[in-house]
Structure formats: structure tokens, C-alpha cells
Image: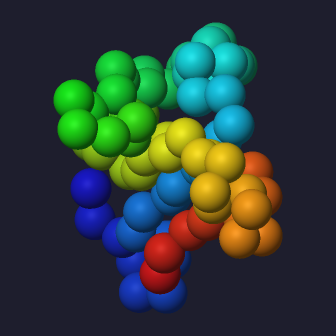
Amino acid sequence: MTNLHGTPIWYELHSADPPASKAFYDHVIGWRIGEPAPDMDYRMIETGHGLVGGVMRLMPEMAAGGAKPGWLFYI
């Protein structure tokens, strides 16, 4: 997928409950969020136009450091 200059190239959701996020976004937006990678809880987001992002489990250590559930995007 080609991105215009200055537009997001990758989206990432930090979620306390990735299976619930998958169920929501798969149903509401039609995305396909894959299964977690074997070595970490990170799931790829497929929109039908290629991979556009990922869903990462927000671990307790991350929350203790101030991280909150939410979306990040990279330009």
C-alpha cells in the first residue's frame, strides 16, 4: 500500500484485552486481526489492502510505567 507524504504508515493499538479488541475491530470495521506472534503478544492488522498495523498487549509493567490503552500511529 502506498502512503502519501505526511500520512500514517503504521497504526498500533496498545490494548489490555487484545482478543476483545480483535472481536470489536474485526466486526465493526471489517479488519482481520491475526493471532499473536509465538514469542510475544503482538497481532498484525490486515485491511484487505495489506498489513497496516498491529495490536500489542498492554502489559502490567507498561501500565506501571504510565502507558495507557490507546492508538499510536507512525508518519
The residue at 75%/51% (across/down) is 69
Reply above or below: 42 against 36. below
User: How many numbered marks does the figure carry?
Assistant: 0
Quadrant position of residue 39? top left
The residue at 48%/75% (across/down) is 74
The residue at 58%/18% (across/down) is 19
Instruction: Answer whether residue 29 is visible to the viewer in this image.
Output: no
Quadrant position of residue 65? bottom right
Furthest-left residue in view? 38
Instruction: Answer whether residue 10 is visible to the viewer in this image.
Output: yes
Left or right: where does residue 64 sit relative to residue 15?
right
Name the spot of residue 40 as percent of width and height, x first. 32, 40
Furthest-bottom residue in view? 6
Name the spot of residue 49 as percent of width and height, x first. 31, 39
Task: Looking at the picture, tell me which residue is in the foreground, 6 or 12.
Answer: 12
The residue at 40%/36% (across/down) is 41
Name the spot of residue 1 as percent of width and height, x first. 27, 56
Left or right: where does residue 28 sit relative to residue 32?
right
Reply above or below: 26 against 12. above
Structure colour scheme? rainbow
Name the spot of residue 51 as percent of width and height, x first. 30, 44
Reply above or below: 55 against 9. above
Left or right: where does residue 55 sit relative to residue 9?
right
